[in-house]
Image (cartoon, rainbow, N blue to C red):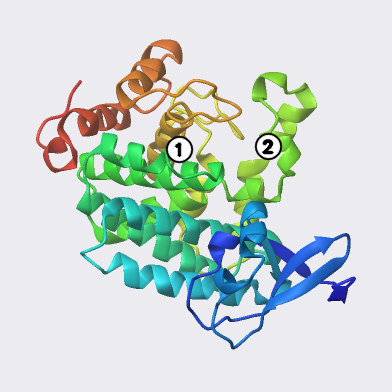
Amino acid sequence: MRNEVDGLVSISLDDILPNVTLPGDIFLKLGENNFVLIGREGTKERLKELHFFDKVKISNEVYIKKMDLRKFSALRVLASNEIMKNDKISTEAKATVLSKTLNSVFNTVSHLGFSHEALGHSKFVANSVIRLIEETPKLNTLMNILNGVSEELVKHSMATSMISVMISQSKGWNNPSILEKMALGGILHDIGLKEYPKEFLKKPRIEYTSEDLEYYQKHPFRGLEILRTVENVPQEVLAIVYEHHENAIGQGYPRAYRDVRLHPFSKVVALADTFCEVSFVDVHNPEARDPDEAITYIENVLGQPFNKECFNALKNVLMFGIRKASVKIVS
């Protein structure tokens, strides 16, 4: 048993890949400042063989050294890459694995900051999202698959990424470089929220004070600051992160720019972000809406404040799927 272990961080038990060589030590917390080593770096993962495994499973939480986070995240990405290339694995299973990978990436960013490695891992998730869409180009199917993801920020980021790519394809933006940037922008658009206290993020927005609202509306700028610490983040992705809460009528934030002044990619992600917000149940949205209802809500309740071409492209995806979307534009 080890007492007063410094530099440990919690991760989900699900983040430990089964039957692999552990890239770092694993600890179980027994009490305040009391930890026991249950897996040693360089040995084979055998947690299920421990006599108290069922008790560990109930808490679903283990601890690793903070310095080992990158190694566990890198291992998760490598494993996910093999799964994404396996045509025998279902889209549902791939989406589940990808969500756990993104959660691992976000957890590493929360503790160690954004890095070139985190950018590379985020690009892997972005390109995997594009691959999922190629396998299952139906919006309804993809949204149903993501309903099973428990981590809200991960689910929202993956969904926003998927919808952004589908809108882009509907608009005829099929260049792989463009699609990667759209998918990456969707994955990272809320990266500024990773530093916000969990207690604050669990507070419904209808209960926000004016100070709370001001604080929340700083997250696009904070996201921009985080990504600027790393070279080679595409300028288009920086624009997406900074402008994903703007809208065509100039009633968004942080700058309240109208449609003509917004980056074309930002217009897509801003719409995808809101569409996904109203589609899933969370603390801010007590009522889930299916895609048709979400479109109607944006159009009739919110007054459709987004770029018209993007909105028509989204409706097109819903009606025809991405393969037919570029043939006919609903207006």
For label 1, the residue is 262
- Residue 84 location, x and y as percent? 31, 65
* Residue closer to the observer: 207 or 240: 207
The dot on residue 288 is none
Residue at (20, 30) in percent of width and height: 316
* Residue closer to the observer: 264 or 146: 146
Label 1 sits on what residue type? Answer: Leu
Single out the mark in the foreground, 2 or 1: 2
Answer yes or no: is residue 143 visible: yes
Q: Residue furthest front?
A: 51
- Residue 88 location, x and y as percent? 21, 64
Q: Quadrant of residue 290?
A: top left
Q: Secondary structure at mark 2?
A: helix
Of label 2 and label 1, which has the lower sequence position? 2
- Residue 319 location, x and y as percent? 18, 28
Residue at (11, 30) in percent of width and height: 328
Question: Image check: 303 left or right of 39?
Answer: left
Q: Secondary structure at mark 1?
A: loop
Quarter of the picture holding the N terminus: bottom right
Look at the picture and state if 173 lies above or below 297.
below
How many residues crowd around disc 1 within 10 Å: few (fewer than 14), some, or many (20 or more)? many
* Residue closer to the observer: 257 or 223: 223
How many residues crowd around disc 2 within 10 Å: few (fewer than 14), some, or many (20 or more)? some
For label 2, the residue is 201
Label 2 sits on what residue type? Answer: Leu
